[in-house]
Image: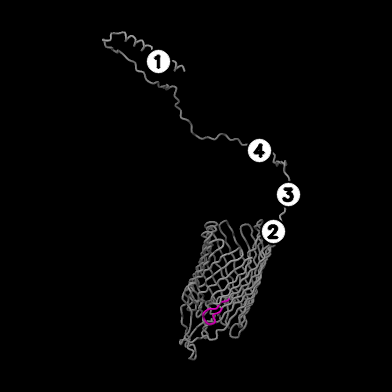
């Protein structure tokens, strides 16, 4: 303010002097020029501080925390604040009784198709209780091919139940299966005359029972003893004099102690096969197995060490001890792990299993168990969340008594059993297994399985009727809540069979004692189907099999059914 007043006074004095000067100039002689002897230059004011007033110290930018005192709250009482103002007990109003949920697992399915196809299915179960489930099922299917007596018929009926207790669960199933066909094979001699004029009927009947008691997992006690006990029994017979009776008991016990588990698997199988050999005798073949183990479990690995102690008794006796070890290691926890192991064992021969693979097995067969002297394997498995799962496995085995099928030399429409490998000369097996499951979206689900099997036989020329490559794939497309489409594909690589030269007009019919190796071509079987849910309870379906109509052969002289289609309705309730 003082500075502004001083400036104002200066400007006022200058203005006054100029005014006086102007008046003086106006009184001079106008003919005389004016002469300026001096002048003052005036400029804007610039405030400048003296050097002594300037601050020459830079600011300190270091971030320093202030001292934090240690506080103590030990004197604060731990009490609940009770505020009861305006609170009272809520009264829940009871609702009228309603059905908990709609039971839709029960269904009845009926269908018909070409090749004389008739299908009937029914499934009924009581699922209204959380800890009890029981029900029954029945199924019938029959078909007839274009060849003479190419017939198939299958029936299945059974009951089942499950009861969940506090500490264990009991479940079981009792059922009956029947499969009927005919020896419709079409071998011919060199003059194209049939070698199978009778085409006899064959039928297999199976009455079976399976029951199991299993401990329930206790989430509050990881070290609780886990146990299981199981009974499996069946009686199996064909239309002739062959059959099998089996009664098996098995048990499992495991105890976890901190970082390792100790346990054992125990089983005994009493088995009898009748109609064996030329005299149609009985073959008693029982197997007892004891598998103790100890398992070390870490965050990323599982190591199991044990052994397989196996005793075969009955008409033949043999005792074997095999090592058993397996290691699992997680490369990426929850997503990828590798595994490897080594073991051995005895695979019990079963007339039931053999005829389910090839129902055209002839009578008077001889039976023996298969021994896995050494089984080394390794692989990788894992997943990528819930949308992608995979597994790949490589294995090498040395085997004794491996069964194969071969056409009978006198009746080629029937098959005999031949075995390869013994204690001195074993069969070598190398195999690769792969499996994948992909869920691309809520609409598309894909799956596939690959098997590569390579046998180095000991005494046989070929591993008869065993393809080196098998591939199976499936797909499901959920088009909408009411419509879905399925597809399945099966590929079998080429295999080999053996046959002789025949002439019905000659004696003997078989011209020589040397068989000829024939190739069974590879085949691809594609099937597909669709189902539409017209209402909440009623739906229609259609399914086509062998879409390319290739009458391929799995076994020599037995072509499969060609293209067949079936359609019908199903009702759920």
Instruction: Let me know if residue 88 appears in the view.
Output: yes
Q: Which residue is mark 4?
A: 73
Between marks 4 and 3, how big is the CA–CA gap? 42 Å
Q: Point out the tag, 2 or 3, that comes first from the N-terminus.
A: 3
Tags 2 and 4 touching, CB below 8 Å: no
Residue at disc 4, secondary structure:
loop
- In the figure, is residue 329 to the left or right of 229? left
Range shown magenta: 142-151
Q: Is residue 531 above or below residue 50?
A: below
Q: Point out the tag, 1 or 3, that comes first from the N-terminus.
A: 1
Between marks 1 and 3, how big is the CA–CA gap? 94 Å
Between marks 4 and 1, how big is the CA–CA gap? 74 Å
Q: Point out the tag, 2 or 4, that comes first from the N-terminus.
A: 4
Between marks 2 and 3, how big is the CA–CA gap? 20 Å
Q: Which residue is mark 1?
A: 11
Query: Who is closer to the viewer here, 527 or 505?
Result: 527
Query: Who is closer to the viewer here, 544 or 216?
Result: 544
Residue at disc 3, secondary structure:
loop
Give the numbered dot on residue 91: 3
Residue at disc 2, secondary structure:
loop
Between marks 2 and 4, how big is the CA–CA gap? 55 Å
The prevailing secondary structure element of the residues shown in magenta is: loop
The residue positioned farthest toward the front in the image shown: 534
- Which callout, 2 or 1, points to the residue nearer the camera? 2
Q: Point out the tag, 4 or 1, that comes first from the N-terminus.
A: 1
Q: Point out the tag, 2 or 1, that comes first from the N-terminus.
A: 1
Give the numbered dot on residue 98: 2
Q: Is residue 365 above or below residue 331?
A: below
Residue at disc 1, secondary structure:
helix
């Amino acid at each position: 303010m003082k500075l502004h007043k001083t400036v104002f006074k200066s400007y006022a004095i200058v203005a006054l002097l100029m005014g006086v000067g102007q008046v003086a100039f106006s009184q001079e002689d106008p003919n005389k020029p004016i002469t300026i002897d001096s002048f003052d230059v005036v400029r804007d004011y610039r405030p400048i501080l003296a050097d002594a007033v300037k601050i020459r110290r830079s600011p300190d930018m270091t971030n320093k925390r202030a001292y934090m005192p240690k506080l103590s709250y030990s004197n604060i009482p731990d009490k609940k604040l009770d505020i009861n103002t305006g609170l009272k007990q809520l009264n829940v109003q009871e609702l009228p009784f309603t059905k908990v949920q709609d039971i839709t697992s029960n269904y009845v399915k009926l269908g018909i198709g070409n090749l004389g196809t008739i299908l009937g299915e029914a499934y009924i179960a009581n699922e209204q209780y959380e800890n009890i489930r029981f029900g029954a099922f029945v199924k019938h299917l029959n078909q007839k091919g274009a060849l003479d007596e190419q017939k198939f018929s299958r029936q299945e009926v059974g009951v089942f139940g499950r009861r969940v207790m506090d500490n264990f669960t009991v479940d079981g199933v009792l059922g009956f299966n029947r499969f009927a066909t005919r020896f419709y094979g079409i071998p011919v001699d060199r003059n194209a005359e049939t070698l199978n004029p009778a085409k006899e009927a064959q039928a297999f009947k199976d009455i079976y029972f399976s029951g199991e008691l299993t401990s329930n997992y206790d989430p509050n006690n990881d070290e609780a003893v886990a146990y299981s006990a199981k009974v499996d029994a069946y009686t199996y017979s064909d239309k002739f004099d062959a059959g099998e009776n089996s009664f098996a008991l098995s048990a499992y016990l495991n105890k976890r102690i901190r970082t390792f588990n100790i346990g054992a698997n125990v089983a005994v199988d009493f088995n009898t096969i009748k109609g064996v050999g030329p005299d149609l005798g009985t073959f008693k073949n029982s197997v007892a197995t004891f598998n103790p183990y100890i398992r070390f479990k870490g965050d990323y690995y599982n190591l199991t060490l044990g052994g397989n102690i196996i005793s075969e008794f009955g008409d033949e006796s043999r005792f074997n001890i095999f090592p058993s070890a397996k290691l699992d290691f997680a490369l990426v926890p929850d997503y990828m792990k590798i595994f490897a192991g080594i073991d051995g064992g005895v695979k019990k021969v079963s007339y039931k299993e053999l005829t389910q693979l090839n129902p055209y097995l002839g009578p008077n067969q001889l039976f023996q168990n298969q021994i896995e002297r050494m089984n080394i394997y390794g692989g990788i498995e894992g997943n990528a969340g819930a949308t992608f799962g995979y597994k790949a496995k490589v294995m090498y085995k040395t085997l004794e008594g491996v069964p194969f099928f071969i056409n009978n030399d006198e009746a080629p429409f029937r098959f005999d059993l031949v075995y390869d490998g013994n204690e001195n000369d074993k069969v070598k097996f190398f195999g690769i297994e792969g499996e994948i499951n992909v869920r691309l979206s809520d609409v598309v689900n894909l799956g596939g399985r690959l098997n590569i099997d390579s046998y180095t036989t000991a005494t046989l020329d070929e591993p008869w009727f065993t393809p080196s490559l098998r591939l199976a794939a499936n797909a499901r497309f959920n088009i909408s809540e009411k419509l879905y489409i399925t597809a399945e594909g099966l590929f079998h690589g080429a295999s080999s069979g053996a046959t002789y030269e025949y002439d019905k007009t000659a004696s003997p019919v078989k011209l020589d004692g040397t068989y000829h190796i024939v190739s069974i071509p590879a085949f691809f079987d594609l099937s597909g189907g669709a189902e539409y849910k017209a209402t909440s309870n009623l739906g229609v379906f259609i399914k086509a099999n062998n879409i390319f109509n290739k009458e391929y052969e799995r076994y020599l002289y037995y072509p499969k059914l060609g293209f067949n289609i079936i359609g019908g309705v199903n009702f759920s309730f």
